[in-house]
């Protein structure tokens, strides 16, 4: 649906998954951390929404009453999705019809939509997401990143081909596999 509507720069499909329990009164918030001694990275952690400036929805889960409910937030800039209400309703209906509301969600892509690799930090109830994770890894450590990439113009000119890109990142080395569905 996303490539057919040419909305690959605005939306992506998100695999619904749980990192850790979230304390009452808090929501998961993704925030970019910038610093002079390391590349930019994103920190995902439970925050009190009333204490976050510029909070906006990031990941939305379908509901039976044809509404998308925000379950992860960000403070980073993103695309204006208000003009895509018809598409969001269509996505919601498709997810409900297929019975996959607890499997797939809709992400309103941030303006910087590069692929991120996740590293869990359960002791801090947080996740670090890095664009180039090699600087975070020490010898022998591994991490895995799974992203759904929608190609708007794929080989043979067939729109709507989805690739599951599995990236395994090892210290100073990267390996990718593309599986076309």
Image: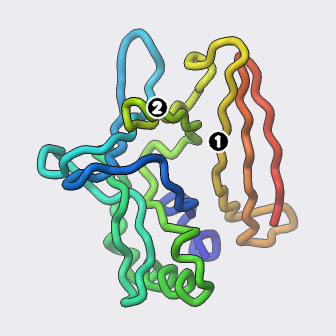
Marks 1/2: CA–CA distance: 15 Å
The answer to which of 20 and 165 lies nearer the viewer is 20
Nearer to the camera, 116 or 8: 116
Residue pointed to by mark 1: 145
Q: Residue at x 78, y 62 (%)?
A: 154
Q: Residue at x 18, y 45 (%)?
A: 52
Q: Residues within 10 Å of mark 1 (few under 14, many from 20)?
A: some
Q: x, y percentage for residue 172?
A: 72, 16
Q: Identify the image quadrant of residue 142.
A: top right
Left or right of residue 164, residue 34 in this image? left
Image position of 54 with respect to 33: above or below: below
Judged from this view, the residue extending furthest toward the left is 50
Q: Is residue 112 above or below residue 1?
A: above
| Residue at image coords 51%, 80% | 91
The image position of residue 110, as x and y in percent, is 42, 49
Q: Quadrant of the C terminus?
A: bottom right
Q: Residue at x 70, y 61 (%)?
A: 151
How is this picture coloured? rainbow
116 shown above or below 156: above
* Quadrant of the drawing holding the N terminus: bottom right
Find numbered disc 2 in the image and state the secondary structure of the residue it sits on: strand
**SS assignment at label 1:** strand
Q: Which mark is residue 121?
A: 2
Q: Position of residue 65 (x, y in %)?
A: 37, 90
């Amino acid at each position: 649906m996303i490539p057919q509507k040419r909305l690959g720069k605005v939306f992506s499909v998100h695999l619904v998954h749980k990192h850790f329990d979230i304390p009452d009164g808090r929501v998961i918030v993704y925030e970019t951390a910038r610093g002079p001694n390391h590349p930019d990275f994103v920190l995902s952690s439970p925050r009190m929404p009333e204490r976050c400036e510029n909070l906006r929805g990031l990941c939305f889960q379908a509901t039976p009453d044809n509404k998308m409910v925000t379950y992860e937030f960000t403070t980073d800039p993103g695309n204006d999705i208000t003009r895509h209400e018809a598409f969001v309703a269509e996505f919601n209906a498709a997810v409900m019809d297929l019975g996959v509301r607890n499997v797939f969600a809709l992400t309103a892509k941030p303006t910087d939509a590069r692929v991120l690799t996740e590293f869990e930090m359960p002791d801090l109830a947080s996740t670090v997401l890095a664009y180039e994770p090699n600087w975070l890894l020490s010898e022998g450590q591994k991490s895995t990143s799974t992203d759904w990439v929608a190609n708007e113009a794929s080989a043979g000119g067939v729109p709507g081909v989805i690739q599951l890109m599995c990236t395994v990142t090892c210290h100073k080395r990267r390996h990718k596999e593309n599986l076309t569905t």
